[in-house]
Image (tube, helix red, strand yellow):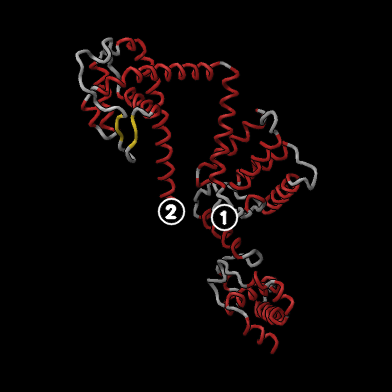
Amino acid sequence: SAVAAAADAELSETARRNVAFEAVRIGNYYSEDQAEVLAYIAQMHSELLSDAKFLRKYASKLNKENGLSTQYTVPEILAKKHEADGFDLFLPADEAIYVKEIAERKAAGLDLGYEEPDPVVYGELQEGLTEAAYAAAGECAPLGPDELLFLLQHCCRAGEVGAAVWGAERLEAVHEDGGVPDEILNPMFEALKPLLRPRSCRNEPRLTGPWSEKSKGKTGPPNPRRGLGLLLMRLAELRKTRELAKGGDASARADRSAQGEETLGRLCTALVPLLAQDSEAAACKRRGPLVPILARVCKDYGLEVSTPVAWDILRVLEQSGEVQPLDKRGVELKHKAEPATGEPPNPVGLKPFSAAVAELDALARDRLGRRRSRQKSREQGKSAKRRREEGS
């Protein structure tokens, strides 16, 4: 009609395409006669263009680009070309793209890294989280800890990081006085841990709530992965504290580690004046070359230490400020070589620490093993990410 033509002329190209998408959504139906269906879609398209109230009410939404409005022209949309390309006509554009990508990855046998819940399950999750948000705002009765834990676990399985972190923080708030009890803390921690792997996280979250709202003064919502890291640190510290309180192996390991750190501290205190007398140590400006120098100085004063122990000595010297950073890898001794006197700075040397060397070595190698394990895990994660990118 003339009214529809006039309205069409005033719309932006993005709005024209989004109106066409809406016409297909409301006008499509099953029929063996597709010409009849397309004729009805064209009629719906004309009626929408003539509906001034509709165009005014949804102006901002119609003028917003999406993943499909940039791919198809108005005639192609009205001919349902996007349906022929495998997109669901009845889903919002970006969600239709996402569903198609998931289907393609499943068909190719690629691991999604997270579960893809049924739409009904997603609806129930969103409803439960919305109720929890209202409860947090004091607008309805609070949800029980078991209900919050249930929502959190399903959010984790679906790769919804923001919703999972928010749910965990709500559980922390519910148990603010006495701390999260073990029967909730342990399953919560185990559910959240897999989200540290990027492939276990959904790139485009589908659940919305307080976690998806823009922060004050920011252009977008906060990064949920940062909140996840801080949350897991708090939970891990709480678990560790409780394990130590129970005694047993965990408490014994902590006592052994604390005793080793105390011995290392005393060793470094005795070593500092000896290093100040060593010109090679004073001239060294790199962490790597400084390690064998530390081992050599220890040996010069009657104490043979392994390379892992020498690295531990360097760590403690850095923590105490006796070895100071210059740049990313550069270091220097805080106290430079002093003028030689008639007597050695420590006549006794480091021999009193000989009895503790074996224990220090065991602790250092245990720490080094954990570090290598973490490095290996990171490398495996990077390798898996490269394979996924190549496969896609």
Query: How many numbered badges does the structure rendering display?
Result: 2
Q: Nearer the viewer, residue 345 or 221?
A: 345
Q: Nearer the viewer, residue 84 or 228?
A: 228
The residue that label 2 is drawn on is 389
Q: Quadrant of residue 206?
A: bottom right
Q: Position of residue 280 (x, y in %)?
A: 21, 27
The residue that label 1 is drawn on is 204
Q: Quadrant of residue 83?
A: bottom right
In the image: residue 361, left or right of residue 344? right
Q: CA distance from mark 1 to mark 2?
A: 17 Å
In the image: residue 113, left or right of residue 41? left
Q: Nearer the viewer, residue 342 or 99?
A: 342
Q: Residue at x 80, y 43 (%)?
A: 141
In the image: residue 203, left or right of residue 133? left
Q: Mark 1 Cα within 10 Å, few/some/many (few <14, many 20+)?
A: few
Residue sitting at the far bottom: 2
Q: Residue at x 79, y 48 (%)?
A: 139
The secondary structure type at the circle numbered 2 is: helix
Which image quadrant: the C terminus?
Answer: bottom left
Q: Position of residue 238 (x, y in %)?
A: 59, 29
Q: Kindly identify the amino acid type of the residue bearing the numbered disc 2.
A: Glu
Q: Kindly identify the amino acid type of the residue bearing the numbered disc 1.
A: Glu
In the image: residue 248, left or right of residue 374? right
User: Is label 1 in contact with label 2 (beta carbons under 8 Å)?
Assistant: no
